[in-house]
């Protein structure tokens, strides 16, 4: 549900898009905990350490997350999505429609093998 300060017309016609990008705040991160700028993805010991900007860990320098997800339904100020990579009740900073012209073709995306390993049962 959108913040009460945002009027309902802010989502007018968003249903014309199949996907949206949600920018949100990692509100449950303890700022007193030390952040590792390099770590093993998901703590899987069979993988090798990679830098924080090479993974989607929640403990980040700026505590901002983003996720492209499928838009399922819109009812007034309630937006239902599928595939959101955020915790329930994470404060939403912004929502943007996904324009296909801004996305690379899947065949052109390069990623290391460990990405498939850590996302196999992600959802």
Image (spheres, helix red, strand yellow):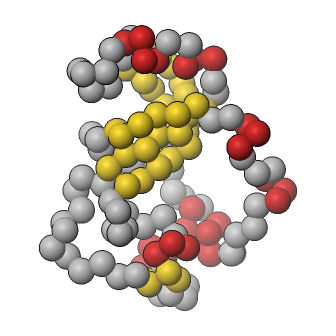
Q: Residue at x 19, y 68 (%)?
A: 31
Left/right of residue 25 with respect to residue 34 in the rendered view: right
Q: Position of residue 66 (x, y in %)?
A: 47, 49
Q: Quadrant of residue 64?
A: bottom left
The correct choice, above or below, for 25 with respect to 33 in the image is above
Q: Is residue 84 above or below residue 52?
A: above
Residue at the image point whose x is 30% and y is 54% from the top: 26
Question: Looking at the figure, which quarter contains the N terminus?
Answer: top left
Query: Does residue 51 appear in this view?
Result: yes
Q: Position of residue 112 (x, y in %)?
A: 68, 75
Q: Is residue 45 left or right of residue 8?
A: right
- Residue 23 on image: x %, y %: 43, 44
Residue 116 or 5: which is nearer the viewer? 5
83, 21: nearer the viewer: 21
How many numbered tags mark residues here? 0
Is 29 located above or below residue 34 in the figure?
A: above
The residue at the point 42 percent across, 18 percent down is: 10
Relative to 78, say whether 109 is above or below. below
Residue drawn where x is 76% and y is 51% of the image: 104
Taking the view exactly as shown, the residue that stands out farthest to the left is 32
Tell me, yes or no, if residue 1 can be seen here: no
Q: Residue 105, image x and y in percent?
A: 81, 50
């Amino acid at each position: 549900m959108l913040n009460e300060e945002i009027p309902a017309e802010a989502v007018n016609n968003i249903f014309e898009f199949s996907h949206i990008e949600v920018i949100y705040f990692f509100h449950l991160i303890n700022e007193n905990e030390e952040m590792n700028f390099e770590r093993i993805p998901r703590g899987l010991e069979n993988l090798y350490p990679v830098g924080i900007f090479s993974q989607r860990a929640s403990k980040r320098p700026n505590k901002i997350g983003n996720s492209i997800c499928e838009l399922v339904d819109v009812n007034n100020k309630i937006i239902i999505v599928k595939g959101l990579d955020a915790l329930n009740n994470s404060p939403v900073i912004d929502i943007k429609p996904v324009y296909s012209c801004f996305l690379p073709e899947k065949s052109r995306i390069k990623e290391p093998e460990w990405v498939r390993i850590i996302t196999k049962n992600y959802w």
